[in-house]
Image: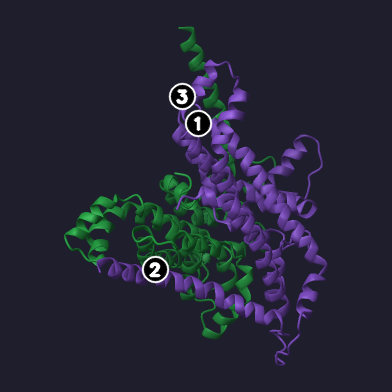
Amino acid sequence: MASIHSRATARLMLSPAVILLLVWMAAPLVMTLWYSLHDYQLLMPRGNPFLGLENYAYFLSDPGFLQSIGNTFMLVMGVLLITVVCGVGLALLLDQPMYGRGVVRVLVVAPFFVMPTVSALVWKNMFMNPVNGLFAWMAQMFGADAIDWLAQVPLLSLTLIVAWGWLPFATLILLTALQSLDTEQKEAAEMDGANAWARFLHITLPHLSRAITVVILIQTIFLLSLFAEIFVTTNGGPGTQSSNLAYLVYSHALLRFDVGSASAGGVIAVVAANILALLLMRLVGKSLEV
Amino acid sequence: MTARATDRQRKLAFTFVAWAVATLIFFPILWTVLTSFKTEADAVAIPPKFLFFDWTTDNYAEVWERTDYLRHFRNSVIISLGSSLIGLCIAIPAAWALAFSPTRRTRGVLMWMLSTKMLPAVGVLVPIYLLFKRAGLLDTRTGLVIVLMLSNLPIMVWMLFTYFKEIPRDILEAARMDGATPGRELLHILTPMALPGIASTLLLNVILAWNESFWTLNLTAASTGPLTAFIASFSAPEGLFYAKLSAASTLAIAPIVILGWLSQKQLVRGLTFGAVK
């Protein structure tokens, strides 16, 4: 009796969250799907005739489309590579005995809390500007020509900016995981004459594997929808050289006011993300204890 | 003796390397703060002036007076705090139910919630934009509170769930034996024990909402934009503006960087959905 009662209460307590998330997810998705099959231009209200898959054909044949897929992939992979590799290194460093570890930690973590629009504008103007930027000055000191980072290598520049913001996150998580490593095991291996590299490879790295998969999962979620950094630095350019899928959809929707093709792009983005999510969940799902 | 000496040498060496690396990583923030105290001419000087320049607070005065900094700051506070508090009201009962009345579907529900976080925001940008336009929610703080609350709800439920799960079941059973109703359970027993978890969930979500830059850029214009949108307006500059950009940036990030430093531990746990503690 009591259990039936409490089960009903539990369902009642859970339902607002579930219903809200369902509505937040399902309703707009259905609308996106509907728009994607119709002709819908915000600036030319002329009814919304059914188009079939024409919007998809239009979006897929956008010269920027393939590039945006490639850019999305490169940005995610580039940032993941930098943050995971440097994050493991940094975590190992911060785990060593040192003076003032608390302060060092605080300094390393700080970039994560800087809002994307600030970090992007600071990097764009004060570091990567070809005339007044610090990088230009450094290049000059070494007698090299200054590069216009965001114009000449926009994707690399964006990768660096974004990686700077996510490196603290990876470091913090890997450090937390590292601190739970059994020191006895390490000492035993040391006694057995295993050198530092072998200890890292056979003890530390396997211990970190779960934390690394988690870092990859979480960062991928956020990196797939990277937007603000592109918006305030390159506007996806030059041309579409630094547009990712999110930015391309935005430009169809709010720059060209073509709701139909933007929706088709949105659907494509959702399908792509779902395929990736399925793969990642299979990979990481085991790491989450429920 | 010698072993101890090399130990200290090692420690000194690590200290040196770690401080150097940390300073390098922190440098962009340090540089922004320094630049915010320069004149515009000093801000673009080549070679750059690191510490020896005429320190001035004019940029702060100018940002404060000439722009609507205060209004955007207020918007940021309202939006991040509002969305987090409303989110908590919905997430606490849900997490409680998932943690204390688990069923066969609990794992499925949790995984489904996580998967909603994977839905790319652009997939729903168009309908949300149009719905908001029709409902008059475009460019309003209410609209952003709703959107940010919903987009962070899965993280809140997950975070709270991992905290609630650690509350010993015995206490609960004892309360049930005494005839406590679920409502009383939640209010008198669980909530006080879960308060630290609830506080860190709130903190983390305020940080996430403060820095959120997809919806805030796409759904607001001038008047109701939070600080993310305010800073973005500096992307089309005129004339010398590095020092002023730096002052505005420092003002925008200072409160949340400080909050962030206080929440490092909870951050790991919250953002990894309890997988790393």
Question: In the image, residue A41 lies at what x, y percent?
Answer: 71, 84
Q: Residue at x 67, y 71 (%)?
A: A266
Distance of mark 1 from mark 2, alpha carbons?
Answer: 41 Å
Chain shown in green: B
- What residue does disc 2 label? A14
**Chain containing the residue with disc 2:** A
Q: What kind of element bears circle 2?
A: helix
Vertical arrangement, residue B194 with respect to residue A261, above or below: above
Please tell me which residue lies in front, A79 or B93. B93
Q: Position of residue B181 (x, y in %)?
A: 22, 66
Give the residue displayed 54% in from the left and 35% down from the top: A207
Quarter where residue A268 is shown:
bottom right
Q: Secondary structure at mark 1?
A: loop
What chain does mark 1 sit on?
A
Residue identified by numbered label 3:
A184
C-alpha separation, residue under disc 2 versus residue under disc 3: 44 Å
Callout 1, which amino acid? Asp
Q: Is tag 2's residue or tag 3's residue first in the polypeptide sequence?
A: 2
Among numbered discs 1 and 2, the one appearing first in the sequence: 2
